[in-house]
Amino acid sequence: MIVFGELLVLFVLVVFEVLPGNNYKKHIHQIQLVISMIGTAIVVIDILVMYFNPQLVWATNDLMDIEAFKYILFIHVIILASSAYKYRSIIKNGNSNVEFTLKKEEYTLSDEFDFSFGNFSIPNIKRAAICNDFIIIFGGRAPTREVDAKYICRKIGEKQYECLSFEVLDEKTIGDILSQIGTVSLVIIFSILPILFVGYGHKWSNPDIRTFIGNINTHLFLVGFGLITIKLFKSVNGITKYIFLLFGFMVIVVSILSIFV
């Protein structure tokens, strides 16, 4: 259970390019497929063990429930199918990457761009970089402002490219540093949570240990929730941005202070 939880965390870190380094970013579709295959296989093995020898599992952990794992398997199958589709799509289109090194003055970011390809519209494209004679669209991670950056893309149409990953070449601002601190904190928190979750379900001889683990698990989850809220809404325009930034900040502060109360 801990292993597939950590694999799920690793999957998110790879997809959102949180891990340091740049070489792996050119092979995200391959890494994503491998991780999803391993994760699905582990969940299937867990379900088989619980099905054929449930007493062995329940004797040590209350949370190892076969019905709950069926839902977990369903999620992993969706992730696997999506990863396989992405991998097939990239391979089918030649698996050839194009790199652009652009200065901030050479393009404009737009949130109003309505991307369409042939007769198909892709509504999940929320941001695009409008350059002089081509367009880069972002279906996932995207820069929050115009910066000097290197973009790794794949061609999807005439003068249209999809950004697979990018590396900022500008000097980091205070906001960038705070964002990195928040990202590292999220990595640590969500790497610890699967371990605490399994520890909470363990049948401890001393019930106080379970209570302590449960409290820490709740506080860490709320801190992580607050950080995710801030990261999701920091680039939103209007008063909604400040409402959710304040909400996320208050969740973090209250969660940390409640540990000592």
Image (cartoon, rainbow, N blue to C red):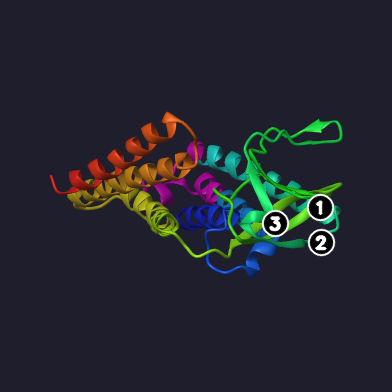
Q: Nearer the viewer, residue 176 or 117?
A: 176
Is residue 23 positioned above or below 8 on the image?
below
Q: Which residue is labeled 1 in the image?
A: 155
Q: CA distance from mark 1 to mark 3?
A: 15 Å
Residue at (82% x, 48% y) in the render = 156
Check if mark 3's residue and mark 2's residue have beta carbons within 8 Å.
no
Using the image, tell me which numbered label, if any, was put on residue 29.
3
Check if mark 1's residue and mark 2's residue have beta carbons within 8 Å.
yes
The x and y percentages for residue 2 are: 45, 56
Q: Nearer the viewer, residue 249 or 8?
A: 249
Three-letter amino acid code at the position of disc 2: Ser
| Mark 1 neighbour density, 10 Å: few (under 14) some (14–19) many (20 or more) | some
Q: Secondary structure at mark 1?
A: strand
Check if mark 1's residue and mark 3's residue have beta carbons within 8 Å.
no
Query: Which portion, as a residue range, is magenta?
Result: 46-68
Residue at (51% x, 42% y) in the render = 69
Three-letter amino acid code at the position of disc 1: Lys
**Magenta stretch: includes residue 5:** no
Q: Which residue is labeled 2 in the image?
A: 96
Q: Closer to us: mark 1 or mark 2?
A: 1
